[in-house]
Image (cartoon, helix red, strand yellow):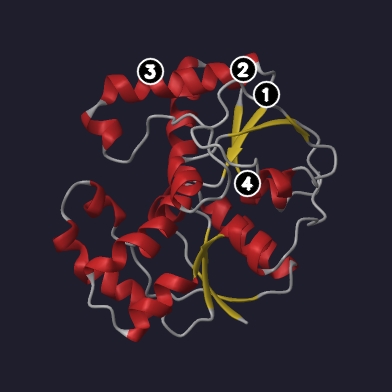
Amino acid sequence: MKVGLFIPCYINQLYPQVGIATLELLEKLGVDVDYPMGQTCCGQPLGNSGYEDDSKGICQLFVENFKTYDYIVGPSGSCVYHVKKHFDILEQTEDVKRVRKNTYELCQFIHDVLGKTHLGASFPYKVGIHKSCHGLRGLRLGSCSERMDTHYSTEEDLLKNVKGLELKTLKRVDECCGFGGTFSVFEEAISVKMGNDRIRDHIDSDVQVITGADHSCLMHLEGLINRNKQPLKVMHIAEILNSSI
C-alpha cells in the first residue's frame, strides 16, 4: 500500500516533533509513506466558524493532493473527521469519495488497517488518555460513557502494550476538554473551566503524562498546564508509540 501522510497545520507549525514521530512510526511498521508537498489546511477552521462554503477550494485542493494514495493517514482525529464527514460540501466525484473513505486517524490505521497493537515501544511513565470528542464520538475510536456500549478503546489497546507504561484510569474518562476550535476563542471562560477540570482529573489520578490522538485538544490543555505551572507533561500518542526510552 502507498500512504499519503497528512500533517495538520498546527502540528506543522507548532509541534513538528509529532509529524516526525508519525512518519517514523509508520516507517517502522513497514509502511511506504509519501508526503505530498502541496498539502495545506483541510478546511476545518473555516467549517468550525460557519464558513464551510468558503472552504470548498481548500477541501478540493486536499483531494487533489491525496487522491492517488491507497490510504491517507494523519495524527489528528478532528482533522480526519472533517475530511471524512464534512467534505460532503464538495461535488461527490469518485476522487472525493475515495479520499473521504480512505482517510484514517493514525491509531485507527495502525489498529484497524494494519491490525497491529504491539509496536515495540517503551515508555516508563504513568499516562492518562484524553479522549477527544471528534475521535471518540466522531470516528468511534472507543466506546462512549453516554452509550451502553461494550467498552473498547483503540488508544488503550495500543498503549497497554507499551513496555513500562502504566495507564491510569480517570474519574471522568471521556469528558470534553473545552477546546472545540473556535469555541475556545468565543467562549473563553467556559473553555478554560472545562480544560482545568480535565487537568485536575489527571492530577488526582496520579498521571505524569497526558496523551491523546488529537493535538488540538492537547495544545489547549498544555497551555493551561504551563500557565498554572502544574506538574504534568503533554505528549501526542504518536510520540509515545514511537518512543524507546
Residue 161 falls left or right of residue 181: right
* Callout 3: SS: helix
Residue type beneath disc 2: Ile
The span from disc 4 to disc 2 (Cα, nearest Å) is: 19 Å
The residue singled out by tag 2 in the image is 203
Residue 207 circle label: 1
- Looking at the rendered structure, the kind of residue marked 1 is Val
Q: Position of residue 90 (x, y in %)?
A: 23, 72
Query: Which quarter of the image is occupied by the N terminus?
Result: bottom right
Q: Is residue 159 above or below residue 44?
A: above
CA distance separating discs 2 and 1: 6 Å
Q: Which residue is mark 3?
A: 193
Residues marked 2 and 1 touching at CB (< 8 Å): yes
Earlier residue among tags 3 and 2 = 3
10 Å crowding of disc 3: few (<14), some (14-19), many (20+): some
Query: Horizontally, is 219 left or right of 109 in the view?
Result: left
Residue in view at x 34 percent, y 66 percent: 40
